[in-house]
């Protein structure tokens, strides 16, 4: 389309015919003449007024058709369903499998809020399944529409609102608010956590920004909703983060939990002592790891050596329909929040170095030089990693620790590592680099994630109070101040000379 804001309006052209007069509305767009004949002066005046209002609102006009942008959008309006298909197709090649899955889940929930009123022949679960499994996933991979989803998809094609409904003064605000309400609830209708709702809201907001980009909408309708949002809390509860002694117990329990547990002891240790994410630990290969030559007990470096991880990729886990290689559930992607060719270097401290050496000596490297594989050389899945973790927790932790949810998931080991680095006084920028985070996220999420931090703070307070006490006693024992003493003290302060002994 060719656009122009140079529009000129002319008086109607009147033609007398046997059946009455014809009034032709005339205007030019970018110098090109436009005409629209109408029966009756009232209709012609109304049409001219519509065009002039669009011009006054600053709309662009299409040079070829002479129509303002808003009218063209109505004439070529896409339904919500059709627009979301375009959005998922446009973003698919540029994002990873986990983000594809997140988009499918967020848009599916929002779609339930933009269905036209009337009889709904399909349940919410059937609509979700059709969207997540085919419309926003397998369809983009080229799969034909399966029979069990055909009826739902055919019905959806005709029963979601057009995108222009979001710009209608009557329907638009209600639709936008309805979407936000839907995203704030779980599938069972109960209130969702703030973090859950915000992730879904972010996805739908990106869709609306895309709709404005391709001129389906003039503005993002979500920005006009004054709905109160619950503030998300990304800070991890310190009560669930294990300390060093508890981590030692958990790793020992893993090492005694069968063949898979022995292999996962080093996997958990990598998260606990190097702060790697699970998808980063799974992706470790021989060329990502530097283990220095081992030295004997008499060597000055014994127990002080450091190795190094050179992280390049992460293996994300998602249903196969969201992966480019649909024969695998894992897909290799760049590091989170990093450029395609970025490398993140993380130190391997002495404790972890000893564990990795034992692991390599006992199990070696798996197919493709992977560090962590299962007993049958298969790639470890999150389900198996989580199952072993759930089984070893009761063996390693006390009833009180279990009751308060200590180390409920393996990811809490990463929290313990990063917060431990902070507690050790390592510079925040360095910790952020090792952890693969921004400094802002690091301080928001991890600064409080350390078991026992309150106790340490109390000890430091007691120490400060103890240091203040001798100073107070020293002041009490000093002689009463007189004019001479006061003068002497002023001289000492002004000159910076040491005070004479009392």
Image (cartoon, rainbow, N blue to C red):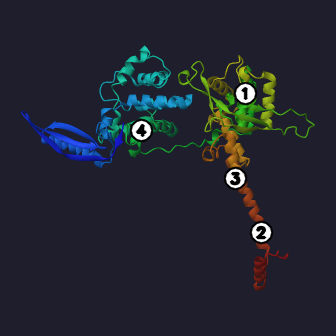
Residue named by callout 3: 458
Residue named by callout 2: 473
**CA gap, disc 4 and disc 2:** 64 Å
Q: Residue furthest bottom?
A: 483
Between 488 and 25, the residue placed more toward the observer is 25
For disc 4, the neighbor class at 10 Å (few under 14, some 14 to 19, many from 20) is many
Which one is earlier in the sequence, the residue at label 4 or at label 3? 4
Which one is earlier in the sequence, the residue at label 3 or at label 2? 3
Is residue 225 depicted above or below 249 in this figure? below
For disc 3, the neighbor class at 10 Å (few under 14, some 14 to 19, many from 20) is few
Residue named by callout 4: 180
CB atoms of marks 1 and 4 within 8 Å? no
Q: Secondary structure at mark 3?
A: helix
For disc 2, the neighbor class at 10 Å (few under 14, some 14 to 19, many from 20) is few
Q: Is residue 283 left or right of residue 499?
A: left
Q: Nearer the viewer, mark 3 or mark 2?
A: 3
Q: Nearer the viewer, mark 1 or mark 4?
A: 1
Residue named by callout 1: 285
**CA gap, disc 1 and disc 2:** 63 Å
Q: How many marks?
A: 4
Which residue corresponds to the image point at 67% horizontal and 48% vertical from the top-left? 454
Which residue corresponds to the image point at 52% horizontal and 43% vertical from the top-left? 232
**CA gap, disc 1 and disc 3:** 44 Å
Residue 23 at x, y percent in the picture: 14, 40
**CA gap, disc 3 and disc 2:** 23 Å
**CA gap, disc 4 and disc 3:** 44 Å
Q: Is residue 184 visible?
A: no
Which residue corresponds to the image point at 29% horizontal and 36% vertical from the top-left? 65
């Amino acid at each position: 389309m060719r656009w122009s804001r140079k529009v000129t309006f002319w008086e109607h052209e009147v033609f007398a015919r046997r059946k009455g007069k014809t009034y032709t509305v005339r205007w030019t767009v970018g110098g090109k003449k436009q005409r629209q004949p109408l029966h009756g002066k009232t209709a012609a005046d109304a049409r001219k007024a519509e065009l002039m209002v669009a011009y006054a609102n600053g709309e662009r006009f299409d040079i070829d058709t002479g129509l303002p942008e808003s009218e063209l959008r109505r004439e070529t309006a896409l339904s919500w369903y059709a627009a979301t298909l375009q959005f998922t197709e446009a973003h698919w090649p540029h994002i990873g499998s986990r983000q594809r899955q997140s988009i499918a889940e967020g848009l599916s929930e929002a779609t339930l809020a933009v269905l036209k009123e009337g009889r709904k022949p399909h349940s919410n679960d059937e609509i979700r399944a059709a969207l997540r499994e085919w419309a926003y996933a397998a369809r983009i991979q080229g799969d034909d529409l399966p029979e069990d989803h055909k009826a739902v998809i055919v019905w959806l094609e005709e029963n979601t609102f057009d995108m222009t409904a979001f710009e209608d003064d009557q329907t638009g605000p209600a639709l936008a608010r309805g979407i936000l309400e839907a995203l704030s609830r779980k599938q069972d209708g109960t209130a969702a956590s703030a973090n859950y709702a915000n992730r879904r809201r972010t996805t739908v907001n990106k869709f609306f920004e895309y709709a404005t980009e391709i001129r389906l909408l003039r503005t993002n309708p979500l920005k006009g909703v004054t709905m109160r949002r619950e503030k998300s809390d990304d800070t991890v509860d310190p009560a669930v983060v294990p300390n060093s002694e508890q981590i030692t117990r958990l790793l020992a329990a893993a090492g005694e939990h069968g063949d898979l547990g022995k292999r996962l002891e080093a996997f958990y240790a990598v998260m606990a002592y190097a702060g790697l994410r699970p998808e980063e630990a799974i992706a470790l290969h021989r060329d990502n790891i530097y283990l220095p030559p081992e030295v004997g007990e008499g060597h000055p470096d014994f127990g002080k050596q450091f190795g190094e991880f050179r992280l390049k990729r992460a293996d994300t886990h998602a249903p196969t329909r969201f992966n480019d290689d649909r024969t695998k559930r894992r897909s290799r992607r760049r590091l989170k929040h990093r450029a395609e060719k970025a490398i993140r270097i993380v130190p391997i401290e002495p404790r972890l170095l000893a564990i990795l050496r034992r692991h390599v000596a006992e199990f070696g490297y798996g197919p493709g030089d992977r560090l962590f594989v299962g007993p049958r050389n298969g790639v470890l899945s999150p389900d198996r990693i989580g199952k072993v973790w759930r089984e070893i927790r009761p063996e390693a932790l006390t009833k009180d620790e279990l009751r308060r949810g200590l180390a409920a998931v393996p990811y809490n080991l990463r929290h313990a590592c990063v917060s431990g680095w902070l507690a050790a006084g390592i510079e925040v920028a360095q910790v952020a680099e090792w952890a693969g985070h921004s400094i802002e996220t690091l301080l928001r999420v991890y600064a409080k994630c350390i078991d026992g931090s309150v106790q340490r703070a109390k000890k430091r307070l007691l120490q400060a109070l103890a240091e203040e006490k001798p100073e107070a006693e020293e002041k009490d024992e000093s002689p009463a101040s007189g004019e001479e003493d006061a003068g002497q003290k002023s001289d000492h302060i002004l000159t910076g000379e040491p005070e004479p002994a009392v």
